[in-house]
Amino acid sequence: MENRIEINGVWYVREDSIKPKFDIIEDLTHSEHYVFESDDYSFDVVRIYRNDNDFYSGFEIRFTDKKDNREDIWDLESFFNGVLDGKPDSIELAKEDLNNEGFQHLIDILSFLRNQGWC
């Protein structure tokens, strides 16, 4: 056993031979996000890095309705593009969760993200 030594009846191991119980560094997820908050809503937009230079396709919006403390995750790119492109089904779906001001905020956020190349 070359990685151990006994001194006065106590066994010791080489420090560099001890593996950490958990290697959390490899389990960390690197992401980029934007957050917008109003009095009524919070929009936390997240996309995840695939590696140091590029991202997985798509992103999600972690939506919180502060009035009733309801949370949801929106991640359908077709919904995001539908809102931006004025598609009635997407607009109707968004307006189920948002008041007029919140809907305008969603459009502004998605327009910003589109200009950033996210969608």
Image: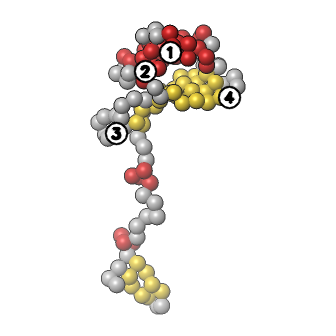
Mark 4 to mark 2 CA distance (whole Å): 26 Å
- Cβ atoms at labels 4 and 2 below 8 Å apart: no
Please name the residue that numbered disc 3 is placed on.
50
- Within the image, what quadrant is residue 70 found in? top right
Q: Earlier in the sequence, mark 3 or mark 1?
A: 3
Q: Earlier in the sequence, mark 2 or mark 1?
A: 2
> What's the amino acid at mark 1?
Ser
Q: How many marks?
A: 4
Q: Nearer the viewer, mark 4 or mark 2?
A: 2
Mark 2 to mark 1 CA distance (whole Å): 8 Å
Dot 4 lies on which element?
A: loop
- Cβ atoms at labels 2 and 1 below 8 Å apart: yes
Instruction: Residue at the far left: name it.
Output: 53
Category of crowding for the residue at label 4, using alpha-carbon neighbours closer than 10 angstroms: few (below 14), some (14–19), many (at least 20): few
Mark 2 to mark 3 CA distance (whole Å): 22 Å
Please name the residue that numbered disc 1 is placed on.
90
> What's the amino acid at mark 4?
Asn
Please name the residue that numbered disc 2 is placed on.
78
Q: Which mark is residue 69?
A: 4
Mark 4 to mark 1 CA distance (whole Å): 23 Å
Residue at image point 45% right, 15% down: 82
Instruction: Residue at the far front: name it.
Output: 89
